[in-house]
């Protein structure tokens, strides 16, 4: 990923494409243990983000991420909008430069924001099960390139998402199912891993 707002905006647009491509998968995952709207909510939210980028003059990575945060918070319903919006907002305040260390710091800030808002930890069967190992992996290689930091984060997030399958949910609507929530991939963890993998692809293409 480059250092300009344009590059970050391109990465966000790629995220929107990935979310749209996986909309049905996320809907099915959420239908199993939630209310079935995660994929559609995310798709609608990122479509609004793209529209906002098309109609705005944002020229720095921080400005782009703040616009993304504001749009997701206002357009995505349920818990996903505030949680993802907080993640992007916290990342924006930590992304003064785009290098491996700053990307790791931005991911850490995003995680801290999500945890502060949602009060979830690893094992609760939420997006934190993907995001926390991603942050740990990113920080372990923060002195390397942006692409390497993001790749480590995405790979850890994918493993973290898969780890939610046997878990019994302790947070959100899925927790109402108790033991019946076990055996299903958490949709929030899955979408988190998809977004991080999208960033890897954007970094490789830049």
Image (cartoon, rainbow, N blue to C red):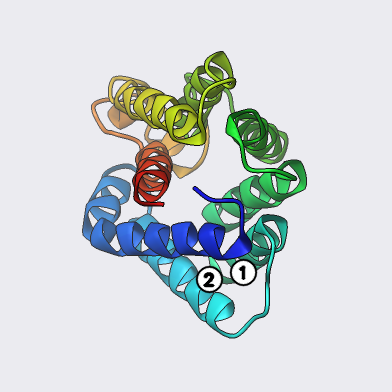
- Tell me where residue 26 appears, x and y as whole percent: 29, 52
Please name the residue shown 51% across and 75% down the image. Answer: 48
Q: Is residue 122 left or right of residue 62?
A: left
Q: Is residue 95 left or right of residue 22?
A: right
- Tell me where residue 4 appears, x and y as whole percent: 61, 58
Please name the residue shown 39% across and 32% down the image. Answer: 154
What residue would you read off at disc 2?
49
Q: Is residue 23 left or right of residue 135?
A: left
Q: Residues within 10 Å of mark 2 (few under 14, many from 20)?
A: many
- Tell me where residue 79 appears, x and y as whole percent: 56, 52
Q: Judging from the image, what secondary structure is the residue with disc 1 in?
A: helix
Numbered-mark total = 2
* Vertical arrangement, residue 109 with respect to residue 61, above or below: above
Q: Judging from the image, what secondary structure is the residue with disc 2 in?
A: helix
* Residue 77 showing in the rendered view: no
What residue would you read off at disc 1?
71
* Vertical arrangement, residue 34 with respect to residue 163, above or below: below
* Vertical arrangement, residue 163 with respect to residue 68, above or below: above
Q: Is residue 76 left or right of residue 199?
A: right
Please name the residue shown 39% across and 30% down the image. Answer: 151
In this rendered view, identify the residue nearer to me: 193 or 149.
149
The circle drawn on residue 14 is: none
* Residue 175 showing in the rendered view: yes
Q: Residues within 10 Å of mark 1 (few under 14, many from 20)?
A: many
Q: Quadrant of residue 16?
A: bottom left
**Labels 1 and 2: the sequence-earlier one:** 2
Q: Quadrant of residue 72?
A: bottom right
- Tell me where residue 38 appears, x and y as whole percent: 39, 56
CB contact under 8 Å: marks 1 and 2: yes
């Amino acid at each position: 990923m480059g250092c300009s707002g344009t590059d970050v905006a391109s990465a966000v647009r790629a995220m929107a494409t990935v979310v749209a491509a996986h909309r049905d998968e996320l809907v099915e995952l959420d239908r199993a243990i939630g209310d079935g709207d995660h994929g559609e909510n995310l798709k609608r939210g990122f479509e609004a983000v793209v529209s906002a980028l098309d109609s705005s003059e944002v020229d720095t990575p921080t400005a782009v991420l703040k616009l993304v945060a504001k749009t997701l918070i206002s357009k995505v319903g349920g818990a996903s909008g505030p949680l993802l919006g907080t993640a992007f907002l916290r990342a924006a305040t930590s992304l003064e430069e785009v290098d491996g260390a700053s990307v790791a710091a931005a991911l850490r800030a995003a995680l801290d924001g999500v945890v502060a808002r949602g009060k979830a930890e690893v094992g609760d069967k939420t997006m934190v099960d993907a995001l926390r190992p991603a942050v740990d992996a990113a920080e372990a290689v923060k002195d390397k390139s942006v692409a390497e930091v993001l790749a480590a984060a995405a790979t850890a997030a994918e493993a973290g998402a898969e780890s939610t399958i046997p878990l019994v949910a302790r947070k959100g609507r899925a927790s109402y199912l108790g033991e019946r929530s076990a055996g299903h991939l958490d949709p929030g963890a899955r979408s988190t891993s998809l977004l991080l993998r999208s960033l890897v692809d954007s970094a490789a293409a830049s």
